[in-house]
Each structure stands twice: as C-alpha cells, then as structure tokens.
C-alpha cells in the first residue's frame, strides 16, 4: 500500500514519533490493513481506521490503494476530532 504523510504540527515526544514511523513503514509494506494487529475500522461512514500506539491513536483513511494518515491524538481526544 502507498502511504501519504503530511505533518502540520511536530510531535515532540521522540519515542512516540519513532513508534509512528515504524507503523508507517509497516503499512507501506502491507498488502492490506487486516494484516496489522492494532488496527480497527471505525463505525463512521467511510473508510476510517485507527491504529493503537500506547495511549495514542493514529487516525487514517483508505482510498483505493492509498492510506492517508490524518491525525495522531491521545486516546481521550481522537474520537472527538477524528473522523
């Protein structure tokens, strides 16, 4: 799958940033998101998913063969601002 990443704000936690970069690389090497262990499809209308990274969640969308990483937020905030 092809991943699209654009950053609007910097993530200051170096450990979290490292873990997110590993997830992005894993997604790029996968054939489908079902092969990833911490991924969950959200109930919202559309192809919205979240990946659990400790106390944080990575919100992403899937369009055909492109995965767009949209948000990285704390678990308390992700469902308020994503999708």
Image (spheres, rainbow, N blue to C red):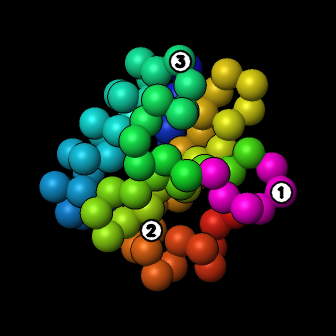
**Residue 8 shown left or right of residue 22 in the figure:** right
- For the point 74% across and 45% down, the residue is 47
The overriding secondary structure of the stretch rendered in magenta is loop
Residue lying at the far left of the rendered structure: 15
- For the point 37% across and 66% down, the residue is 56
Q: CA distance from mark 1 to mark 2?
A: 20 Å
Local crowd at mark 3 within 10 Å, few (<14), some, or many (≥20)? few
State if disc 3 and disc 2 touch (CB < 8 Å): no
Q: Position of residue 21 (x, y in %)?
A: 30, 39
Using the rendered image of the protein, determine whether residue 8 is visible from the camera's viewpoint. Answer: no
In-front residue for pair 33/13: 33
Q: Position of residue 71 (x, y in %)?
A: 53, 58
Q: Is residue 80 above or below residue 9?
A: below
Give whichever of discs 1 and 3 has the lower sequence position: 3
Which numbered disc covers residue 73? 2
Quarter residue 12 falls in: bottom left
Give whichever of discs 2 and 3 has the lower sequence position: 3
State if disc 2 and disc 1 touch (CB < 8 Å): no
Q: Is residue 60 above or below residue 71?
A: above
Element marked by disc 1: loop
Magenta-drawn segment? 41-46
- For the point 53% across and 18% down, the residue is 31
Frontmost of labels 1 and 2 is 1
């Amino acid at each position: 799958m092809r991943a699209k990443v654009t950053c609007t704000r910097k993530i200051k936690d170096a450990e979290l940033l490292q873990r997110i970069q590993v997830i992005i690389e894993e997604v790029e090497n996968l054939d489908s998101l079902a092969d990833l262990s911490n991924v969950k499809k959200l109930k919202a209308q559309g192809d919205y998913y979240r990946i659990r990274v400790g106390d944080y969640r990575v919100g992403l969308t899937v369009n055909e063969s492109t995965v767009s990483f949209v948000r990285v937020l704390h678990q308390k905030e992700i469902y308020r601002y994503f999708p």
